[in-house]
């Protein structure tokens, strides 16, 4: 029998080896994030990448410490961004037409995408004409003024877009300089809510069962405890898979396994599926991107196995009925959508997505989402202290997060899609209201300012 000392030494050696490996990965994780962010800004959103980098670095704790050591080169002819840290840890992100940007880690996404022809007609009535919709009254204008106002000193809010939809029509919208009605904006983790909707569509079609074990090939051994992970566990981030956390964006998050997945692995879902359990499925809430990448793989496989199949499915079943036309959904090297964070759409299109949930999953008299899916999405996950449902954050229930947001003015029936650094699609059924807000904000992603925006808009529209 091994002595305690020997076991302890072996454990310490394993931990040390893991620490060395993680430290070796960190420069490439950091440069992968920067290269991908700049590539998407330059070639998908087509906004100033230097501005995006400066705002993002300022909003992420610790990044300012290494900002001076990061060097990025944008090759506009090749549509490629190369980033190094201290002259090492090099990463490249490349733009592919219709597929967005990809960090080059081996493999390549299918180049063929479905034609833009033969798109089906929108079932959702148009929410506005082509012109910018200015606030109709002074109080609503003041609400937007406050949403874009900056404090005298950091942390700054950098609000880029606000769209307010009341009773199915835009009643006010505003954009920062360099942004506009046609600018595709990154949803970051608001993309997770879109993946949740696509899972719902598969459930409605009988292709998946939400409470059944997730059909993941890597978990099919009868002795594998991961066989107990259900689709609902993945939606609610209670799978128990040990991936680290995606709750906070900071320099230290570069050490998390989940970010190795996003910036070093060509097959993100396979990497997530290989994770061990840190807790029995359903017993621990741990929000991380790995859960959503596994769901994204299920969507890819159900659609046909390729990026083109995914886009055909997504357009036909979700985007086209909502009138969403210009979306960019980015993929990993295996053709799995990077559904944890990489969807770009205009603020109006994000608002259209919110209307699907405001209208209980029904568009133009046709049900896209299963009956009851919206309420389940907004139902609080036990132990989710920040207030999360199934693919959406929620003010329903008694979580600490919901109590905090309600105290700031966000109604208790509200629920929302949320992305890191301040991306929000907020649905308030009691007010027949959707508010889309996008920016690059520090200080808890401006949840105080966004909650105040909801309260201000409600007060303005209530008069």
Image (spheres, rainbow, N blue to C red):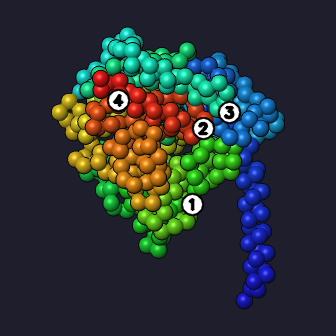
Residue behind mark 3: 57
Q: Is residue 185 visible?
A: no
SS at circle 1: loop
In the image, farthest residue toward the top = 131
Which is in the foreground here, disc 3 or disc 2?
2
Question: Which x, y percent locates residue 298?
Answer: 41, 50
Task: Using the numbered discs, state the Cα–Cα distance from disc 3 to disc 1 in whole angstroms.
Answer: 27 Å
Q: Residues within 10 Å of mark 3 (few under 14, many from 20)?
A: many
Q: Are marks 3 and 2 in contact (CB under 8 Å)?
A: no
**Mark 3 vs mark 1: which is more N-terminal?**
3
Which is in the foreground here, disc 3 or disc 4?
4
Residue displayed at 50% across by 43% down: 340
Residue behind mark 1: 242
430 vs 112, left or right, is left
**Mark 2 vs mark 4: which is more N-terminal?**
2
* Above or below, 208 relative to 47: below
């Amino acid at each position: 029998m091994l002595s305690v000392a020997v076991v302890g030494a072996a454990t310490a050696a394993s931990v040390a080896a893991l620490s060395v490996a993680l430290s070796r990965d960190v420069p490439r994780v950091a440069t992968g994030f920067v290269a991908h962010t700049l590539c998407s800004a330059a070639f998908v959103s087509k906004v100033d990448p230097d501005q995006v980098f400066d705002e993002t670095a300022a909003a992420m704790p610790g990044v300012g410490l290494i900002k001076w050591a990061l060097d990025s080169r944008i090759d506009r002819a090749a549509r490629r961004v190369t980033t190094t840290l201290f002259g090492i840890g090099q990463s490249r992100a490349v733009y592919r037409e219709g597929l967005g940007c990809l960090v080059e880690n081996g493999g390549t996404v299918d180049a063929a995408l479905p034609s833009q022809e033969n798109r089906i007609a929108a079932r959702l009535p148009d929410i506005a004409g082509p012109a910018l919709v200015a606030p109709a009254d002074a109080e609503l204008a003041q609400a937007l003024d406050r949403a874009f106002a900056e404090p005298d000193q950091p942390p700054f809010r950098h609000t880029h877009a606000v769209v307010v939809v009341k009773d199915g029509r835009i009643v006010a919208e505003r954009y920062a300089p360099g942004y506009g009605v046609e600018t595709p904006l990154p949803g970051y983790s608001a993309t997770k809510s879109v993946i949740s909707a696509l899972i719902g569509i598969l459930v409605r079609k009988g292709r998946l069962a939400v409470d059944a074990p997730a059909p993941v090939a890597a978990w099919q051994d009868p002795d594998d405890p991961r066989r107990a992970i259900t689709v609902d566990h993945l939606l609610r981030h209670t799978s128990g898979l040990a991936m680290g956390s995606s709750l906070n964006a900071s320099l230290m998050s570069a050490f998390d396994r989940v970010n190795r997945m996003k910036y070093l692995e060509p097959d993100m879902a396979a990497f997530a599926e290989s994770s061990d359990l840190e807790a029995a499925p359903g017993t621990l809430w741990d929000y991380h991107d790995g859960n959503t990448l596994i769901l994204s793989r299920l969507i890819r496989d159900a659609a046909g196995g390729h990026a083109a199949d995914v886009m055909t499915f997504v357009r036909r079943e979700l985007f086209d009925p909502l009138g969403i036309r210009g979306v960019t959904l980015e993929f990993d090297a295996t053709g799995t959508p990077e559904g944890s964070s990489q969807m770009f759409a205009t603020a109006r299109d994000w608002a259209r997505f919110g209307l699907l949930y405001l209208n209980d999953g029904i568009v133009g008299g046709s049900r896209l989402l299963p009956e009851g899916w919206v309420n389940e999405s907004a139902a609080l996950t036990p132990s989710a202290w920040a207030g999360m449902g199934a693919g959406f954050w929620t003010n329903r229930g008694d979580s600490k997060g919901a109590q905090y947001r309600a105290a700031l003015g966000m109604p208790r029936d509200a629920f929302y899609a949320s992305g890191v650094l301040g991306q929000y699609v907020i649905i308030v059924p009691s007010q027949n209201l959707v508010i889309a807000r996008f920016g690059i904000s520090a200080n808890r992603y401006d949840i105080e300012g966004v909650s105040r925006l909801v309260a201000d808009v409600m007060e303005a529209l209530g008069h």
